[in-house]
Structures are given as C-alpha cells and as structure tokens.
Image (tube, rainbow, N blue to C red):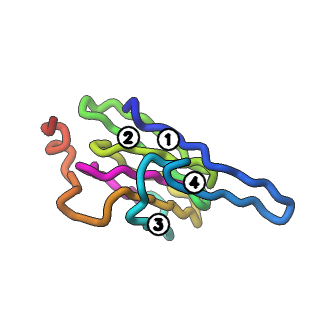
Amino acid sequence: MNEIKIVNLPKISDPRGNLTFIQAPDHIPFQIKRAFWMYDVPGGEIRGGHAYKSQHEVIIALSGSFDVIITDRNNNRQIFHLNRSYFGLYMPPDTWRHMENFSTNSISLHLSSEIYSEDDYIRDFNEYKSVK
C-alpha cells in the first residue's frame, strides 16, 4: 500500500469561483487514456470491488464525498475519505478497492492509464489474494 497516495491538485481561488486542473505528468504519473465518472449512487450502495492488473487510476470527488477502501492480500484495510475536488487518490495496478458511503449528489471522477479491457480486471477477492 506504499504507493497509494493522495495527490494535491492545484487550487486557484477566486471570489467568482475556484478552479482546479490536472495535467500529466505534473499531477499524475501516467498518460490519461480513459475518464469516467459515477453519480446518482443510491444510499448504502458499494461500487468497485476489484483490482486492475496493469491500469493506474486517480479518483477525485468532484462533488460530495465518499470513502475508498483499499484492502491488501492480508485483509489489512486503509480508508481514504474523499471530499475535496482538489485532492485525488492515486492507486497503482494491483490495488484492491471498493467505494462506499456516498453522500447525496456525489460525483466521482476516475482517470485511467488504459482504455477499458475486461481482461485487466480481477473481480474475485480470493483470486486476487492468490495472485503474486
């Protein structure tokens, strides 16, 4: 879990409204090949529950808040509460994660180093524990 970290993104304050931006490689350690976002997650729902074999990812709470729970192969957990749009959570490949505790109207932005490939996913935690 050593490589997992919060990334501080630039925040330009202005009385008319703040601005934050991302540019690679200044703020994230990979070229963005895919972006997606989650929204309208019903209360109590859990999203994620997988690891990527080769994909790097940064997750940002654009609106509202949610928790990203990282679980290693020994069932040790680390919780990251994301609630500011100028913080991102960087996760290298081989990181098991799920998301929960979504606030009303929360939006999570996901920036990925790879285009979508189902073959890159490990969706079974027991399989994840047996790899490596």
Front residue of 123 and 16: 16
Residue bearing the label numbered 2: 70
Which is more N-terminal, label 4 or label 2?
4
Tag in front: 2 or 3? 3
Q: Secondary structure at mark 2?
A: strand
Which is more N-terminal, label 3 or label 2?
3
3D distance between C-alphas at marks 3 and 1: 18 Å
Residue bearing the label numbered 3: 37
Segment tinted magenta in the rendering:
45-60
Disc 2 and disc 1 in contact, CB within 8 angstroms: yes
* Kind of residue at badge 4: Ser
- At label 1, counting other C-alpha atoms closer than 10 Å, the crowd grade (few under 14, some 14-19, many 20 or more) is some
Q: Is 30 on the left-hand or right-hand side of 76?
A: right
3D distance between C-alphas at marks 2 and 4: 16 Å
3D distance between C-alphas at marks 3 and 4: 13 Å
Front residue of 45 and 128: 128
Which is more N-terminal, label 1 or label 3?
3
The spot of residue 95 in percent (x, y) is 32, 42
Tag in front: 3 or 4? 3
Magenta stretch encompasses residue 49: yes
- At label 3, counting other C-alpha atoms closer than 10 Å, the crowd grade (few under 14, some 14-19, many 20 or more) is few
Q: Is residue 67 visible?
A: no
Residue bearing the label numbered 4: 65
Q: Image point 75% across, 54% down: which residue?
A: 12
